[in-house]
């Protein structure tokens, strides 16, 4: 093969892997995953396969040939601290727990951090200009279009349950997820409904809502103000309702509220070339966004009232005697505070470097707050040895995990990285160019999603956070280098 032929093949492989990376993002618990690279964990992103190709063909070569964003520095510092903390854990007296020792735990958690960071670095380095960013965004939309279509097929058995239909959908689901479907909630292509709702709210809606505000689309087709992004936005909001996820519904409401505030902020901008800032056009678009928000709120209230899992929030005062359970126990949230307090206790015992990535579980029994747990069955299950149970507990909170497992140094370096990405967002948000302002609005909404989901997840391998931060960083880097 000639040199030109090799170059064409190289470019084709990169383009295909690039598209597949974003196309496969909705699949986060892929069953066919080698055990050595996370096949025994809940989080198994299908996107890891195209990511490996891009790391070899794109990331490694460009790390030595392109200017690097300054956000890489604090993230590299955090990686270093996490490595030191995890290695230092071998000096602690840690006993085997549920058949799992420290060494495989070390390997698995370093691998998950490496996967997460590889997502971030690769996404930043592969997006070299606005055309690249639009390409990435289009494939995110296409991937989620498939996920939403699959979620819609799942919604059918909620509206009209049929045993043969449910079994058929469940059998197909097993090709994409390690967990069976729920009869009363939808999971999309993910492990569980909550993951699907958070995925939509954190990884998809920020870009769609920003498009609704700006009237921008990455597709050629549009009918007046109606674009593909508007279709996906309405579709996403409806699908989130069928997940019956409390976090997802709260995130949907928070994003809707911040979107209206951002729209008012954008409306205060001076007119620019193209005449997009006509008051009539602004008022019309604000009315459209507000109508959709109000409709979603009404539908969400009606749907929530029919689901006992969600209606717990207001049934406490009508169904449960106040003296029997506290409100937080009734809504099944009290155990989260126990996990977080245990993490804080671990941090206080090992304040500088923590106990090493993934080692929170080894100290859980020892650091558990001294209080009765007879009304918290989940805590009792965690501290009761059961044959066959080999999955270790986590704090279910990203910052609680950082404190417990990487200590003060890990929390500071990771927070510095977060602040650097926030700086990228503000740089884009206050840009003179409406093209880059779109990315700033998206980044702001992305951070709203981040502030919500960090209280319910703590996995570094889940690509949601890294993809959002990577796209924001890439957009800021493109804006900076093209000035």
Image: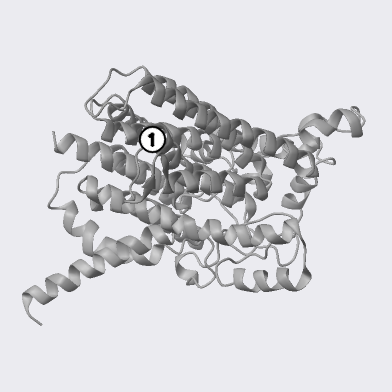
Q: Residue at x 22, y 69 (%)?
A: 12
Residue occupied by mark 1: 443
Quarter of the figure with residue 170: bottom right
Q: Residue at x 32, y 19 (%)?
A: 269
- 66, above or below 99, in the image: above
Q: Is residue 482 or residue 79 the one in the foreground? A: 482
- 336, above or below 144, in the image: above
- Is 300 on the left-hand or right-hand side of 289? right
- Is 240 on the left-hand or right-hand side of 274? right
| x and y, in percent, of residue 374 in the image | 85, 41
Q: How is the image coloured?
A: one colour
Q: Residues within 10 Å of mark 1 (few under 14, many from 20)?
A: many
Q: Quadrant of the C terminus?
A: top left
- 382, above or below 318, in the image: below
Q: Is residue 249 or residue 335 the one in the foreground? A: 249
| x and y, in percent, of residue 222 in the image | 37, 47
């Amino acid at each position: 093969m000639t040199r030109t032929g090799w170059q064409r093949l190289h470019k084709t492989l990169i383009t295909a892997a690039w598209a597949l990376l974003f196309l496969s993002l909705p699949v986060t618990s892929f069953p066919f995953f080698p055990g050595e690279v996370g096949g025994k964990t809940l989080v198994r992103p299908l996107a890891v396969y195209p990511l490996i190709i891009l790391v070899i063909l794109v990331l490694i070569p460009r790390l030595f040939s392109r200017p690097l964003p300054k956000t890489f520095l604090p993230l590299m510092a955090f990686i270093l601290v996490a490595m030191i903390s995890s290695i230092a854990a071998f000096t602690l007296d840690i006993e085997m727990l549920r058949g799992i020792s420290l060494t495989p735990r070390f390997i698995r958690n370093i691998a998950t951090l490496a996967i997460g960071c590889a997502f971030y670095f690769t996404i930043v380095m592969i997006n070299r200009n606005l055309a690249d960013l639009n390409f990435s965004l289009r494939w995110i939309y296409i991937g989620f279009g498939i996920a939403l279509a699959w979620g819609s097929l799942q919604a059918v058995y909620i509206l009209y349950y049929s045993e043969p239909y449910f079994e058929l959908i469940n059998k197909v689901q097993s090709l994409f997820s390690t967990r069976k479907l729920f009869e009363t909630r939808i999971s999309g292509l993910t492990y569980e409904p909550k993951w699907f709702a958070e995925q939509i709210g954190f990884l998809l809606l920020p870009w769609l809502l920003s498009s609704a505000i700006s009237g921008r689309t990455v597709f050629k087709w549009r009918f007046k103000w109606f674009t593909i992004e508007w279709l996906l936005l309405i579709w996403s909001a409806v699908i989130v309702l069928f997940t019956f996820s409390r976090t997802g519904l709260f995130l949907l409401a928070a994003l809707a509220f911040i979107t209206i505030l951002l729209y008012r902020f954008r409306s205060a901008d001076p007119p620019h070339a193209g005449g997009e800032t006509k008051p009539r056009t602004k008022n019309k678009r604000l009315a459209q966004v507000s109508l959709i928000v109000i409709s979603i709120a009404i539908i969400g209230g009606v749907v929530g009232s029919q689901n006992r899992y969600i209606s717990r929030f207001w049934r406490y005062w009508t169904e449960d005697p106040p003296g029997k359970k506290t409100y937080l126990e009734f809504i099944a949230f009290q155990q989260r505070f126990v996990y977080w307090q245990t993490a804080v206790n671990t941090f206080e015992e090992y304040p500088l470097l923590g106990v090493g990535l993934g080692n929170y579980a080894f100290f859980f029994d020892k650091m558990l707050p001294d209080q009765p747990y007879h009304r918290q069955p989940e805590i009792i299950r965690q501290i009761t040895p059961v044959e066959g149970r080999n999955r270790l507990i986590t704090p279910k909170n990203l910052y609680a995990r950082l404190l417990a497992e990487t200590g003060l140094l890990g929390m500071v370096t990771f927070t510095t990285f977060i602040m650097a990405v926030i700086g990228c967002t503000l740089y884009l948000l206050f840009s003179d160019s409406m093209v880059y302002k779109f990315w700033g609005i998206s980044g702001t909404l992305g951070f709203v999603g981040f502030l919500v989901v960090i209280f319910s997840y703590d996995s570094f391998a889940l690509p949601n956070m890294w993809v959002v931060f990577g796209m924001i960083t890439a957009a800021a880097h493109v804006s900076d280098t093209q000035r």
